[in-house]
Image (spheres, rainbow, N blue to C red):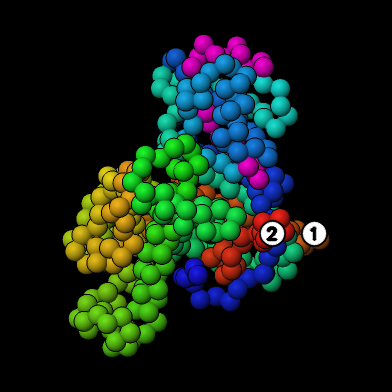
């Protein structure tokens, strides 16, 4: 059960992730140099996953799939624009690309291939249906508020498979101690990592909400915290409360450092210049310290060593928000930018106050 941050009433709209309603475009980390041994392709694709796109490019060019660089994975059920790199000498083989699902929008040369994570963020444009005039106004107002104050950076339902339980298989694989075989096992273990992160983040949102909405005395009793600690936490004016030892990171990308001065860090956090990170547990992931580690420890799995692990922003700010409403069709188009790795559906769920995960098809119940 996801813990939502904001106190508005649920807002009704119809959401379906399809190629006609869900658009996303990568924002590259760097400008391409215009020269070099790599060709960067700006590709528009429809109804095709990134893995399938890489496979199709490999077949067309004769390249190994590992020679095709990409920055991030994009959904199949969407119209997406993303950047991939191939060795320059394979450019002439691109004439073999014949599928209508792929369009090469632009090309540029670069000195280095594209690597995973080399993204500033993603620009989304999502069409919501069955939106009343009042709901359109509420969505626009709420989205604007979230741009100012931020939202929790939960992993979206897409991370956890059709039945939302793939993390259980991932846990079993992670605890087997064996080396991971293939992309599927990595995805299952990554689902388990994501599950632990979401549980930790939900707990931090819950305790922040308790401190935000109750007296210090009531909150101390409910959380079983010392009165003095709750009073210090309550002095932070932002919603998501920081703890000594939180591993903070410059936002939207940059260096990490441990929180030592709570009042200064809270001010910089409120300005959107730094954000706390949560643990994606693994063999090389840095852990938080002190008070923050006591909150993190129940969601850490030190047996998970088959993946390196990482840190992930706990709190993000949707940016460049614009909305367009068509009263006749009752459609609202919402445009916004999120940092890399953040899910558009998580933002929409915080607005709607409900899960947007589609119901499982009948054959999956049998």
Q: Residue furthest right?
A: 328
Find disc 1 in the rendering and name its residue.
329
Q: Picture quarter containing residue 12?
A: bottom right
Q: Is 276 left, or right, of 146 in this rendering?
A: left
Say which element carries label 1: loop
Q: Is residue 261 left or right of residue 199?
A: left
Between 320 and 27, the residue placed more toward the observer is 27
Q: Residue at x 80, y 59 (%)?
A: 329
Q: Residue at position x 63%, y 55% from top?
A: 334
Element at label 2: loop
Query: Which badge, 1 or 2, is on the more N-terminal residue?
Result: 1
Name the residue located 63 percent from the left edge and 71 percent from the top edge: 11
Q: Position of residue 302 (x, y in %)?
A: 28, 54
> Distance between the Cα atoms at labels 1 and 2?
37 Å
Answer yes or no: is residue 12 visible: yes
Q: Quadrant of residue 321?
A: bottom right
Residue 87 pos. (x, y %): 48, 17
Q: Is residue 233 above or below residue 88?
A: below
Instruction: Residue under label 2, please give it.
Output: 366
Residue under the image location 24 percent in, 57 percent down: 288
Tell me where the magenta segment starts and ends, as one range: 76-96
Q: Residues within 10 Å of mark 1 (few under 14, many from 20)?
A: few
x and y, in percent, of residue 32 in the image: 46, 25
């Amino acid at each position: 059960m996801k813990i939502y941050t904001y106190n508005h009433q649920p807002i009704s709209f119809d959401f379906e992730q399809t190629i006609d309603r869900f658009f996303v475009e990568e924002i590259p980390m760097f400008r391409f140099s215009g020269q070099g041994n790599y060709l960067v392709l700006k590709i528009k694709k429809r109804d095709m996953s990134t893995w399938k796109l890489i496979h199709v490019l490999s077949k067309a060019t004769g390249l190994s799939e590992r020679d095709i660089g990409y920055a991030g994975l994009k959904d199949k059920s969407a119209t997406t624009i993303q950047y991939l790199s191939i060795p320059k000498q394979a450019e002439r083989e691109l004439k073999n690309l014949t599928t209508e699902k792929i369009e090469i929008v632009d090309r540029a040369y670069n000195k280095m291939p594209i690597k995973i994570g080399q993204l500033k963020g993603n620009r989304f444009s999502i069409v919501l249906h069955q939106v009343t005039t009042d709901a359109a106004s509420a969505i626009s107002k709420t989205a604007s508020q979230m741009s100012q104050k931020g939202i929790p950076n939960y992993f979206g339902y897409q991370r956890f498979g059709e039945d939302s339980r793939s993390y259980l298989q991932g846990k079993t694989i992670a605890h087997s101690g064996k080396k991971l075989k293939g992309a599927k096992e990595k995805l299952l273990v990554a689902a388990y990592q994501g599950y632990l992160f979401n549980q930790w983040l939900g707990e931090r949102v819950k305790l922040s909400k308790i401190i935000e909405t109750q007296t210090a005395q009531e909150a101390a009793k409910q959380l079983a915290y010392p009165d003095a600690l709750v009073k210090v936490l309550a002095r932070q004016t932002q919603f998501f409360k920081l703890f000594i030892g939180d591993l903070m990171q410059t936002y939207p990308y940059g260096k990490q450092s441990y929180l030592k001065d709570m009042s200064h860090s809270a001010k910089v956090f409120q300005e959107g210049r730094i954000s706390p990170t949560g643990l994606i547990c693994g063999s090389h992931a840095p852990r938080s310290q002190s008070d923050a580690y006591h909150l993190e420890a129940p969601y850490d799995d030190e047996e998970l060593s088959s993946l390196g692990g990482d840190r992930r922003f706990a709190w993000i700010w949707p940016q460049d928000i614009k909305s367009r409403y068509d009263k006749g069709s009752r459609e609202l188009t919402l445009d916004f930018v999120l940092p890399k790795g953040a899910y558009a559906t998580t933002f929409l769920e915080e607005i709607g106050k409900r899960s947007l995960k589609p119901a499982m098809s009948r054959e999956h119940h049998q």
